[in-house]
């Protein structure tokens, strides 16, 4: 039976598959956790739906967790998403309070798994506060921003920045989509 990675050999070439196996060797057995806001719908879910099984095929202990939110949480994060892309969207304090509480509750639910991981990838603004709610983390935490935050509505970016600046690194889709943060930043275009 062919695994998922091998099924890409006709497209990428067997040399690429072999190279991926070689590159992943130091990561074998490491624990990686991805966290985002939905398992279906949207580009991040499509990416993780392929990326996680591919990482597992490379013998990287990879899991995908989805935060659980309520209507107010998603109302807040929709406004945040729009504001980070430049819309002058004010977000009410009570919605920000809900945003932080939902993140605290989810981080608590997943804390043992997150704090035990070698790498945690937090995708987009929705779960950004997770890091501050996991004080005993042992691994590296990376904020993966899939949206263009190059010209955000400043008050909302200032609010979010207090969370994302604490990460060990961040990843943006394009250099032109990034904001300067006090940690290493990497550019990885989206791919499925």
Image (spheres, grey):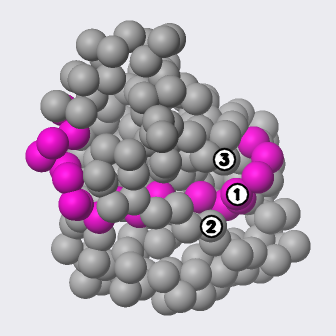
What secondary structure is found at the residue carrying circle 3?
helix
Q: Which residue is mark 2?
A: 66
Q: Give the image quarter of residue 191.
A: top right
Q: Position of residue 117 (x, y in %)?
A: 29, 70
Residue 29, numbered label: none
Relative to the observer, which residue lies in front, 10 or 141? 10
Image-based side of 48 in relation to 86, left or right: left
Mark pair 2, 1: CA separation? 7 Å
Up-down relation of residue 69 to residue 167 (above or below) = below
Q: Which residue is mark 3?
A: 45
Q: Residues within 10 Å of mark 1 (few under 14, many from 20)?
A: some
Q: Which residues are magenta?
A: 23-42
Q: Position of residue 44 (x, y in %)?
A: 63, 43
Mark pair 2, 3: CA separation? 10 Å
Q: Is residue 26 magenta?
A: yes
Q: Which residue is mark 1?
A: 39
Q: Residue at coordinates 24% horizontally, 23% vertically from top-left?
A: 18
Q: Residue at coordinates 59% horizontally, 87% vertically from top-left?
A: 105
Earlier in the chain: of badge 3 and badge 1, it is 1
Q: Position of residue 85 (x, y in %)?
A: 69, 35
Quick check: marks 3 and 1 in contact, CB under 8 Å?
A: yes
């Amino acid at each position: 039976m062919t695994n998922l990675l091998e099924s890409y050999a006709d497209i990428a070439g067997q040399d690429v598959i072999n190279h991926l196996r070689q590159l992943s060797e130091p990561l074998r057995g490491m624990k990686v956790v991805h966290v985002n806001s939905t398992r279906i719908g949207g580009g991040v879910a499509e990416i993780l739906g392929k990326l996680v099984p591919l990482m597992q095929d490379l013998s990287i202990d990879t899991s995908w967790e989805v935060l659980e939110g309520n209507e107010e949480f998603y109302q807040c994060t929709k406004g945040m998403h729009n504001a980070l892309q430049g819309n002058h969207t004010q977000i009410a304090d009570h919605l920000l309070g809900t945003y932080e509480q939902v993140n605290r509750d989810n981080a608590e639910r997943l804390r043992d798994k997150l704090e035990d991981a070698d790498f945690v990838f937090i995708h987009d603004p929705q779960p950004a506060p997770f890091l501050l709610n996991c004080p005993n983390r042992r691994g590296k935490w990376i904020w993966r921003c899939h949206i263009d935050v190059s010209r955000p509505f400043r008050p909302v970016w200032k609010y979010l920045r207090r969370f994302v600046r604490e990460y060990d690194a961040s990843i943006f889709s394009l250099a032109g989509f990034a904001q300067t943060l006090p940690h290493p930043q990497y550019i990885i275009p989206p791919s499925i």
